[in-house]
Image (spheres, rainbow, N blue to C red):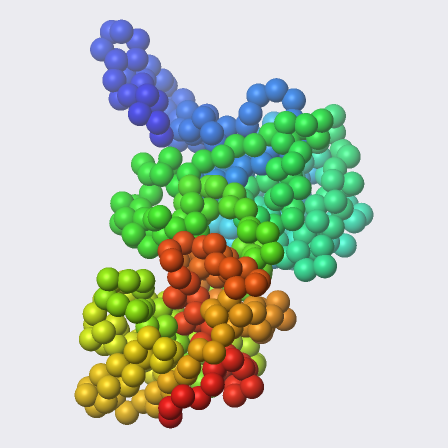
Amino acid sequence: MSADRLDFLQHDADGLGRTLPDLLNEQERGAVPWNWPLWARAAQLPPSGHWRVWLIMAGRGFGKTRAGSEWVRKIAESNPGSRIALVAASLHEARSVMVEGESGLIAISPPHCRPRYEPSLRRIVWPNGAQALLYSAADAEALRGPQHSHAWCDEIAKWDDNQGQARRCWDNLLLGLRLGAAPKIVATTTPKAVPLVRRLMKQVGTDADVVLTRGSTQENAANLPGRFLDDVQREFGGTLLGRQELDGELIDDLPGALWTRGLIERCRAVPDGAPMTRIVVGVDPPASAEGDACGIVVCGLGADGVARVLADASVEKASPERWARAVAEAAKAWSADRIVAEANQGGAMVEAVLRAAHAALPVRLVHATRGKVARAEPVAALYEAGRVRHAGLFARLEDELSGLLPGGTYQGPGRSPDRADACVWALTELMLGRTGEPRIWMD
């Protein structure tokens, strides 16, 4: 709740020393917690004027889901004839987030008009007869026939757009939005430079009647744990990914980049703890302690033949002793089978320190015969082929990958893509073997 609304509730409401609760009867006081306009921030309320699509594009924790749920609730409670489509990246997410989540439709509805969820029919029914149906964006054809009066589409930037699937889903939804006098869609999402989001952004303020609300994680700080805010700021602050995921900016890709943001998102996977058949730590040592970071990236190969980026353990402004120790700790933590280190910048230090620590791990020193970007190109092709997954968010690593351009150019953060190069060494070892870039320098 905003400070002015909280002050209105708790302090002199009518000039006679009485607070708002003193002025309400018992029934009215019971309705206060369910009065969304009273508690919402202005950015969470529907915009005024004529619009067909309300695009809420904001950082994590902004309150997008709550805004979408409350809009659907208002439509359903005020219009018994409404037929609402709830579309998410999957049916599981539609149910777990949009329906049963902490900010989902069931949780935010008052007891006297709480909707009934019918899982077998993928349907929600309100006491007045209004209905909402659940859809997966992965099944665009499911939206080809049904008609709706309204729709809430959640995390549209996350929808799978392989062969244009996400855009076909959106188009089929639009073609079926023909019930009622004024069909509308609310689309809630964290910004990502994917085709559907770009398409909607081009329509903002045009005759397509798309209105945009933007916002950051920090705007909802009053309703978020302080520890969460500290943690995400420490992890993602100052990165391009942080600007996207926290500040709600739409980060454009560099023209021709080997890794686009959309490609990385398509290759993202939830860490599931699946056993790896082989784990490698890739190391790109710095030229000096005052120079760039020491790239230390852990990658594993799954039984399915797909590689996973598991951890970014890179350290900055570290002495040779310190970054070599960081390599040893990462190898121990992940039970690595091998360490692959570039020898050009004194990579022999890694082997020396490991031997001094009695770490019986094979260390392969490799000599870079080509530049970082040239080494990265065959690995980028593995991403395009769906043979690599990121098991989590790696903000600084992903910023560097997105800055690699063909022809040997780097336009990402920092002077050198050390984290990206370490990742390339590890994935080359896992996926490309002795036919890849690394040439055996010492074993």
Count all numbered tags in the image, as a single digit. Answer: 0
Q: Is residue 28 left or right of 22 when viewed as pictured?
A: right
Q: Residue at x 27, y 7 (%)?
A: 15
Q: Residue at x 36, y 80 (%)?
A: 343
x, y (%) of residue 303? 53, 83
Q: Residue at x 54, y 82 (%)?
A: 436
x, y (%) of residue 213? 52, 32
Q: Is residue 384 left or right of 274 when viewed as pictured?
A: right
Q: Is residue 373 left or right of 247 when viewed as pictured?
A: right
x, y (%) of residue 250? 52, 43
Name of the residue lying farthest toward the top: 15
Q: Is residue 108 above or below residue 305?
A: above
Q: Residue at x 38, y 91 (%)?
A: 442
Q: Is residue 260 above or below residue 188?
A: below
Q: Quadrant of the image for the C terminus?
A: bottom left
x, y (%) of residue 346? 30, 78
Whether residue 294 is visible, yes or no, is: yes
Q: Quadrant of the image for the N terminus?
A: top left
Whether residue 73 is visible, yes or no, is: no
Q: Is residue 290 above or below residue 239?
A: below
Residue 396: image quadrant is: bottom left
Q: Nearer the viewer, residue 418 or 69?
A: 418
Q: Nearer the viewer, residue 86 or 218?
A: 218
